Amino acid sequence: MFAVIKTGGKQYKVAVGDVVKIEKMKSLDKGAFPVGTQITFDEVMLMDNGTDTTVGTPFIPAAKVEATLEEVGRNKTVDVIKYKQKSRYFKKNGHRQPWFKVRIVGIK
């Protein structure tokens, strides 16, 4: 059994037991997602149990995917450089994209 979920502007094909690295989810209060938190994805676009395939328009109303947060981290630094020759213009910025690593526990 597998499902296709949408989170962070991306789509992921997941099955029970998979570990997926997703975009960090926003929350109103800081530190709302400690390791071990249960996360529910309700934007399920497709479900397949081997015999039946259900496709949402765009989402399946009653479907949910349960996951457990295993790790929170940030990627390596991406350097962004803006440079214009002969005008003494040089800007250098760095960006580290945050991510969550989640383990899929159940598909309902």
Image (cartoon, helix red, strand yellow):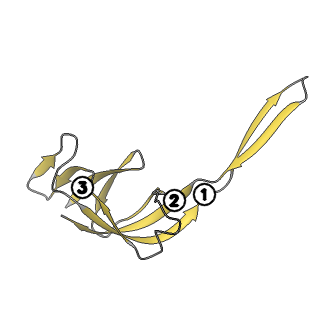
Question: What residue lies at 47% left-to-right and 68% top-to-bottom?
Answer: 32
Q: Decide: few, some or many residues near mark 2? Use Cα within 10 Å; few <14, some 14-19, many ≥20.
A: some
Residues at circles 2 and 1 in contact by the CB criterion of under 8 Å: yes
User: Left or right: 93 with respect to 106?
Assistant: right
Q: Decide: few, some or many residues near mark 1? Use Cα within 10 Å; few <14, some 14-19, many ≥20.
A: few
Q: Which image quadrant is residue 92 in?
A: top right
Numbered badge on residue 99: 2
Residue at mark 3 to residue at mark 2: CA–CA distance? 21 Å
Q: Which residue is mark 1?
A: 75
Image depth: mark 3 or mark 2 in front: 2
Q: Secondary structure at mark 1?
A: loop
Foreground of the two, 71 or 13: 71
Q: Amino acid at mark 1?
A: Asn
Numbered badge on residue 3: 3
Q: Amino acid at mark 2?
A: Trp
Q: Secondary structure at mark 2?
A: strand
User: Left or right: 98 with respect to 7?
Assistant: right
